[in-house]
Image (cartoon, rainbow, N blue to C red):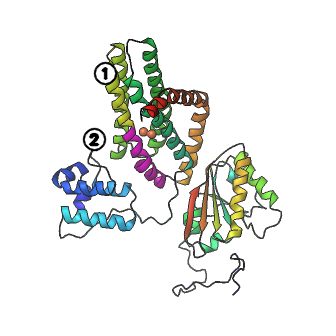
Amino acid sequence: MSGCGCPGSKTMTFEKAEQTETGGAKTSSPSQLRQWPVQLHLVSPVAPYFQGADVLLAADCTAFALGDFHSEWLAGKSLAIACPKLDANQDVYEGKLKSLFEDARINTLTVLIMQVPCCRGLLGMAARALKESGRKVPVRAVVVGLQGDIIQDEWLEG
Amino acid sequence: MNEYLRTPIREIISRFPQVGSLLEAHGIGCVPCSLGTCPLGDIVDIHGLAPEVELALMTAIGAIVAPGEAVVLSARPAASSPKKGFSPPMKTLVDEHRLILRLIALVPAVTASLDVHAEDDRQLVVAIVAFIRNYADRFHHAKEEDLLFARFDRESDILQVMYEDHANGRACVKAAVDALERRDPAGVTDNLIAYTEILKQHIRKEDEILYPWMDRKLSTRQVGELFSAFRKIDSAFSEEAGRYEAFVRSLEDKFASNDAEVA
Ligand SMILES: [Fe+2]
Ligand SMILES: [Fe+2]
């Protein structure tokens, strides 16, 4: 294994207790998603579900890493997802985030990213949009470990 | 020991004084508390101790109050996420505490040289009282009482202690003003110093115990709502707040330097 490969794409396997596949028959964990679309390129800050909302800006991978993504993180929030490493035209993203602060007058923004370094870009984008915005709201930065643990959870300075 | 979790701490400490020393050793200052009605279980919960520290403390308390019985921990879920630090609205209250503490630190020097028969000195006391009443009370305590505390159980023991501190502080200031009108220097000094003692302890309780506990209980939505409600008040008060900050700075120039010369 190369010692200087990108940690964002390094191959790893995590040992977990054997679980049986239920084939989608189980519905005991209802979805907390209350909107469509969700991708940051596709959503509009003027959409009704963003007005005055608590918004979750989640890096794509977080929903797969967290065991309780729906119940703990998405519940009660409106959602936008993005990948700061692979998505194109990311300059549009910053403008949309600024518009969420100023036009949608959102209540809070929670930025959920993975611990890999490339994911920090999403947090940086949110921080810049907040700095540029004439309206301030609390922004919470949460970093998720590769095995779904919460590594960091803090509020950004307004 | 289950019954002891719901017993007011004052009762426990008076029956088992060693419990008071144990709590003090963990930085939980219930012994000098003016009310002491908080149940033991809530006190341990509210301090947000690490699970292993809480287990050790409860084991030690259990050995004193109910020897031989199984240890029962408070019913809160184990802390699963790392500490967040103060949320933005809580941070503004903590920042306001800093200005209040800066003023409080100057009160001993101001009262030491106070001449109640000199118009300038009387005006200085009036200005300090105006800071306390307008900045500390009408601005800061009103945000706490009307917006923050209102989101919690007002009847809870911990909030009753906070309301009582606010009320005691107001009573001391009123007594200092009355003493100034009577030209009673000891009355002015004693009551202003008593006010500073109440507020120093009160701010410590809020910064170290109450606010961190409240921040753990507040939902993200509530944090956002408090933030915008505080901002509305802050922007309406911003000019006045600026004047009070300048006032504290001018007092520091005048009195803190005198202290430095003595030291
Ligand atoms: Fe207070
Ligand atoms: Fe306070």
Q: In which quarter of the image is the N terminus of chain B?
A: bottom left
> Mark 2: which secondary structure?
loop
Residue B207 on image: x %, y %? 44, 47
Q: In which quarter of the image is residue B174?
A: top left
Q: Which of marks 1 and 2 is in front?
A: 1
Q: Which of A61 and A74 is in front in this view?
A: A61
Q: In this view, does B90 lie to the left or right of B162?
A: right
Q: Which of B220 and B209 is in front in this view?
A: B209
Query: What amino acid is labelled 1 in the image?
Result: Gly
What residue would you read off at disc 2? B34
Write down the chain letter for disc 1. Answer: B
Is-magenta flag for residue B201?
Answer: yes
Residue A32 on image: x %, y %? 60, 64
**Residue A46 visible in the shown view:** no
Q: Residue at the spot x=37%, y=19% of the render?
A: B177
Q: In which quarter of the image is residue B40?
A: bottom left
Q: Residue at the spot x=35%, y=43% of the render?
A: B155
Is-magenta flag for residue B220?
Answer: no
Instruction: Decide which of tag 1 and tag 2 comes sooner along the chain.
Output: 2
Numbered marks: total: 2
Up-down: is B123 above or below B170? Answer: above
- Write down the region rendered in magenta: B200-217
Q: Main secondary structure of the magenta part?
A: helix
